[in-house]
Amino acid sequence: MPRLFTAFEIPSQIAAQLAFFRGGLHGARWMEPQDYHVTLRFFGDIDARVAEALAADLAETESFSGGAPLRLELDEIGVFGGRSPRALYARVKADPLLTRLQAAHEAIARRNGLPPETRKFAPHVTLARLRGVSSGAAGVWLAERAFPLGLAFEAARFALFSSRDSVGGGPYRLEAVYPFG
């Protein structure tokens, strides 16, 4: 069964700038820059029939932006997990069009019999997975990097990816692309 998700790819020049943050936090498992992405919807492990239906239905959202690329801005570094940090990330600045696109992918998932996503959509690029990292250590690491990122790029397409069955995903395989317009 494939493990699938939709996401925006990160351009190599943005990935190189994000890779600058790698290191300096004992216990962090850093993502490889070529695996950086902004997830729209994680579908999970699904059978081939559902995978084919999802791939076909996602084409409905190719015209979502009216043919124009979506501008994505990475504005700050953060941590998920609070007292039990589990991931470091670069946050994607809120954008109504991005939120509507994610909602369209959610609707496609439900239409194909997948359970609803229970977490609120928080667009981001995962930089590292954290295990056994204290909130204090994560806080110090973040405080040393508490400045605006100001990284932006144009996303002219989104993609359907598959991942291997493992903790933390990557490497990811590109299964299909959906250009806007």
Image: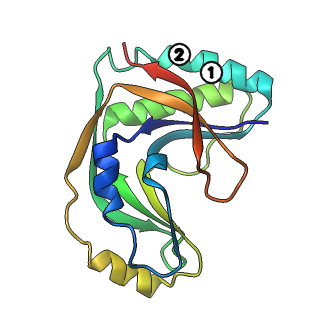
Image location (x, y in percent) of residue 99: 40, 36
Image location (x, y in percent) of residue 74: 29, 50
Left or right: 132 in relation to 179: right
Question: Toward which corner of the image does residue 168 lie, by quadrant?
Answer: bottom right
Identify the residue position indicated by label 1 in the image. Answer: 55
Type of amino acid at the residue the image marks with label 1: Ala
Q: Is disc 2 surrounded by few (<14), some (14 to 19) or many (20+) residues within 10 Å? A: some
Question: Which color mode does the image show?
Answer: rainbow
Left or right: 154 in relation to 50: left
**Circles 1 and 2: CB atoms closer than 8 Å:** yes
Quarter holding the N terminus?
A: top right
Type of amino acid at the residue the image marks with label 2: Ala
Question: Toward which corner of the image does residue 43 lie, by quadrant?
Answer: top right
Q: Is disc 1 surrounded by few (<14), some (14 to 19) or many (20+) residues within 10 Å? A: some
- Residue 43, compared with residue 92, is above or below; it is above
- The image's mark for residue 59 is 2
Secondary structure beneath disc 1?
Answer: helix
